Image (cartoon, rainbow, N blue to C red):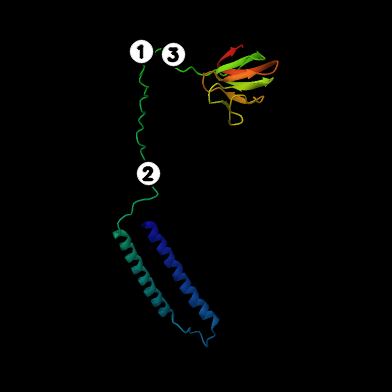
């Protein structure tokens, strides 16, 4: 509040100085006969005193208004927020639902990453439940039932007797006698999964 009153007093002083300077300039610019000014010094002083009294009354009124006004909360004050307590959920383990009657054969083994190189001669068949790639030679699809082989590269189903395209990834989805028969003198396959070689 002291700072605000000091600022107002400074403004009043500047206003008074400007008033006096204005009267002096007006007096200097006009020519008069004799030494008398159009306004007497006592009149100017009386007017300045009245102006000062009015300004002081305004300052006092403003000071009282500021003193009676309720203090507003300081919005610039830093607020400290307490973060909510973080509770770590206990690790849950899957219940062991395996019964005594189940054996290890019920679990599905993870597929091996490596491919095996399999060499076959004419007439031999590669059967099983596996993925394979024909690298050299020729072969045809062997499908005793209605379903064929899955050509994963072409996105097609290959029925029995369909020629196998080299370097395509094929899948024998079920171990039900489906496979591939070599029609050239020999052939090389890359195989991953469970397979068997049948010789006629």
The location of residue 42, given as percent across then percent down, is 41, 79
Q: Identify the image quadrant of the C terminus.
A: top right
The residue furthest right is 185
The location of residue 107, given as percent across then percent down, is 44, 17
The residue carrying pointer 1 sits among few (fewer than 14), some (14 to 19) or many (20 or more) residues within 10 Å by Cα, namely few
- Pick the front one: 38 or 53: 53
Callout count: 3
Callouts 2 and 1 close, C-beta under 8 Å = no
Q: Viewer-nearest of labels 2 and 3?
A: 3
Residue ID for mark 2: 79
Tell me if residue 44 comes above or below residue 6 in the rendering.
Answer: below
- Pick the front one: 34 or 149: 149
Tell me if residue 162 comes above or below residue 73 in the rendering.
Answer: above
Structural distance between the alpha carbons of marks 2 and 1: 64 Å
* Mark 2 or mark 3, earlier in chain: 2
Q: Residue at x 34, y 51 (%)?
A: 73
Residue ID for mark 3: 105
Secondary element type, mark 2: loop
Left or right: 180 as drawn, with respect to 26: right
* Mark 2 or mark 1, earlier in chain: 2
Callouts 2 and 3 close, C-beta under 8 Å = no
Structural distance between the alpha carbons of marks 1 and 3: 11 Å
Secondary element type, mark 3: helix
Q: Identify the image quadrant of the N terminus.
A: bottom left
Residue ID for mark 1: 101
- Residue 165, picture quadrant: top right
Tell me if residue 152 comes above or below residue 188 in the rendering.
Answer: below
The location of residue 47, given as percent across then percent down, is 40, 77
- Residue 132, picture quadrant: top right
């Amino acid at each position: 509040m002291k700072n605000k009153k000091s600022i107002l007093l400074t403004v009043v002083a500047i206003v008074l100085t400007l008033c006096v300077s204005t009267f002096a300039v007006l007096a200097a610019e006009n020519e008069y006969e004799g030494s008398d000014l159009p306004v007497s010094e006592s009149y100017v002083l009386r007017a300045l005193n009245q102006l000062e009294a009015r300004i002081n009354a305004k300052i006092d009124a403003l000071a009282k208004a500021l003193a009676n006004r309720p203090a507003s909360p300081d919005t610039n004050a830093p607020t400290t927020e307490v973060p909510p307590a973080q509770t770590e959920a206990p690790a849950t383990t899957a219940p062991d639902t395996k019964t005594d009657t189940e054996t290890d054969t019920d679990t599905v083994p993870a597929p091996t990453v490596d491919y095996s190189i399999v060499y076959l001669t004419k007439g031999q068949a590669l059967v099983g439940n596996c993925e394979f790639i024909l690298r050299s030679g020729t072969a045809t699809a062997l499908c005793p039932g209605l379903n064929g082989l899955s050509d994963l590269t072409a996105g097609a189903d290959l029925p029995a007797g369909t020629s196998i395209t080299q370097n395509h990834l094929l899948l024998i989805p079920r171990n039900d006698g489906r496979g591939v028969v070599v029609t050239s003198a020999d052939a090389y396959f890359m195989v991953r999964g469970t397979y068997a070689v049948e010789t006629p």
